[in-house]
């Protein structure tokens, strides 16, 4: 697939969207940690080089680009906690994080491009869902990089407190090593109890102390 471009953003200018935020999330699939969303408003005259879907970039390249994005663009970040994920489900928690990311922007955009096929409920501005948006829209690609780097840093920090689960490497995703660590060491306060692999062992393993 070709690299993302600014075509969708340009097409929305005709609808009055002169300030457009790309929105994406990171962390829907992991067994642990929050879900993180980012909203990015790029300057059309100063778009960082090399923006792409965060999954197609190395960790080192993401970190470099994240710093450049923060210098050249308006950035908002929003989180939904493990408790919120367990209470309202991961999809709704992802959408909550997206709304929080938009609210965290320095100024309100005219519209938002949301990665995925569903729009968050209770949006207070026009929005367009863009399937595979991180591979199509530069604004969404930038948001994917910010969301991924913020979440990876959170999981690295949590790894310092709970080093047995490999969160510095797996970011909380259900790797074989992470699943085995759950069986050996139990469930931490940062595990998502509503996710089946965690729920299935919840009754048989005591949570480690904080």
Image: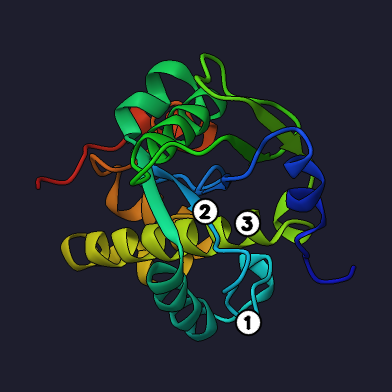
Distance of mark 3 from mark 1, alpha carbons? 12 Å
Q: Residue furthest top?
A: 122
Q: Position of residue 119 (x, y in %)?
A: 65, 25
Q: Position of residue 71 (x, y in %)?
A: 38, 73
Disc with the residue nearer the chain's start (3 vs 1): 1
Query: Relative to 54, is 116 above or below?
Result: above
Mark 3 is surrounded, within 10 Å at the Cα level, by few (under 14), some (14 to 19) or many (20 or more) other residues, namely: many
What secondary structure is marked by label 1? loop
Find residue 67 and report its image quarter. Answer: bottom left
Distance of mark 3 from mark 2, alpha carbons? 7 Å
Disc with the residue nearer the chain's start (3 vs 2): 2
Q: Which mark is residue 41?
A: 2
Mark 1 sits on what residue? Answer: 49
Q: Position of residue 38 (x, y in %)?
A: 46, 49
Query: Relative to 22, is 68 above or below?
Result: below
Distance of mark 2 from mark 1, alpha carbons? 15 Å
- Where is the N terminus found, in terms of image quarters? bottom right
What secondary structure is marked by label 2? strand
Mark 3 sits on what residue? Answer: 139
Mark 2 is surrounded, within 10 Å at the Cα level, by few (under 14), some (14 to 19) or many (20 or more) other residues, namely: many
Residue shown at 30%/42% (left/top)?
187
Q: Is residue 193 left or right of residue 143?
A: left
Residue shown at 53%/84% (left/top)?
61
Mark 1 is surrounded, within 10 Å at the Cα level, by few (under 14), some (14 to 19) or many (20 or more) other residues, namely: few
Q: Nearer the viewer, residue 125 or 145?
A: 125
């Amino acid at each position: 697939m070709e690299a993302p471009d600014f075509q969708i953003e340009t097409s929305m200018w005709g609808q009055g969207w002169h300030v457009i935020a790309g929105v994406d999330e990171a962390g829907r699939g992991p067994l642990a940690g929050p879900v993180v969303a980012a909203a990015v408003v790029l300057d059309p005259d100063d778009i960082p080089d090399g923006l792409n879907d965060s999954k197609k970039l190395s960790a080192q390249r993401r970190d470099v680009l994240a710093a450049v994005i923060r210098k050249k663009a308006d950035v908002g970040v929003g989180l939904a906690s493990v408790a919120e994920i367990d209470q309202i489900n991961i999809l709704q928690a992802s959408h909550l994080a997206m709304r929080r990311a938009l609210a965290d922007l320095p100024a309100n955009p005219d519209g938002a491009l949301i990665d995925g096929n569903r729009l968050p409920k209770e949006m207070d501005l026009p929005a367009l869902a863009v399937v595979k948006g991180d591979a199509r829209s530069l604004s969404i690609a930038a948001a994917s990089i910010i969301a991924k780097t913020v979440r990876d840093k959170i999981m690295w920090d949590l790894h310092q407190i709970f080093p047995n689960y490999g969160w510095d490497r797996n970011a909380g995703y259900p790797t074989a090593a992470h699943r085995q660590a759950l069986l050996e060491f139990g469930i931490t306060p940062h595990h998502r109890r509503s996710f089946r692999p965690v729920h299935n062992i919840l009754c048989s393993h005591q949570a480690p102390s904080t």
